[in-house]
Amino acid sequence: MKFKRRLKLEAGTMDMTPLIDVVFQLLLFFMLSSSFIMQPGIKVRLPKAVTSKVIYDKMDIVTLAKNHRIFFNDLEISKDQLNYHLEQIADKEGMVLIKADSAIPLGVVVDIWDLCRQAGITQLNIATDTIQK
């Protein structure tokens, strides 16, 4: 007696829903766990220094742009308005970071430094880029 096999392979379909769920969860995880360091605002090319270090304290930023414009915490102001803001910072004993473009003459940076000292600010820093050895 001869038996015939009626075993027929059917083309299977794979349910894609679990795969899509896993990929979506991985995408969300990596997007939320990664940090993007962006500094929006004024484009300033900082001078380079070998001995610079990273400062993590909260401080107010005075930016001197290439075209001699003055910014205080990303808001363009005049020199008189800057003096007012510096006096406010001195009252609460705050810190100031001066970010000057490398094309700015040293005399302009020293003028802003003197304004800070006249206002009574004792903790001043100048922003630089580090040189990779």
Image (cartoon, helix red, strand yellow):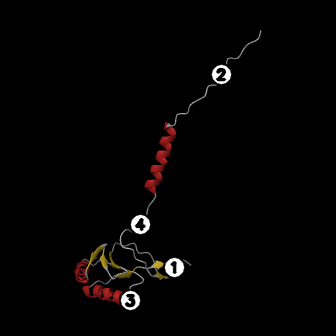
The dot on residue 8 is 2
Mark 3 or mark 1: which comes first in sequence?
A: 3
Question: Dot 3, how many residues are within 10 Å of its Cα: few (below 14), some (14-19), or many (20+)?
Answer: few
Mark 4 or mark 2: which comes first in sequence?
A: 2
Q: Between residue 48 and residue 59, name the one nearer to us.
A: 48
What residue did someone put label 4 on? Answer: 38
The type of residue carrying mark 4 is: Met
The type of residue carrying mark 1 is: Ile
Instruction: Determine whether the residue tagged by mark 2 lies in a helix, strand or loop.
Output: loop
The dot on residue 106 is 3
Q: Between residue 17 and residue 29, name the one nearer to us.
A: 17
Mark nearest the camera among 2 and 1 is 2
Marks 3,2: beta carbons within 8 A:
no
Q: CA distance from mark 4 to mark 1?
A: 20 Å
Q: Quadrant of the N terminus?
A: top right
The dot on residue 131 is 1
Q: Spot the residue most to the bottom.
A: 107
Who's the residue at 49% across and 37% down the image?
17
Q: Spot the residue most to the right.
A: 1
Who's the residue at 29% across and 83% down the image?
121
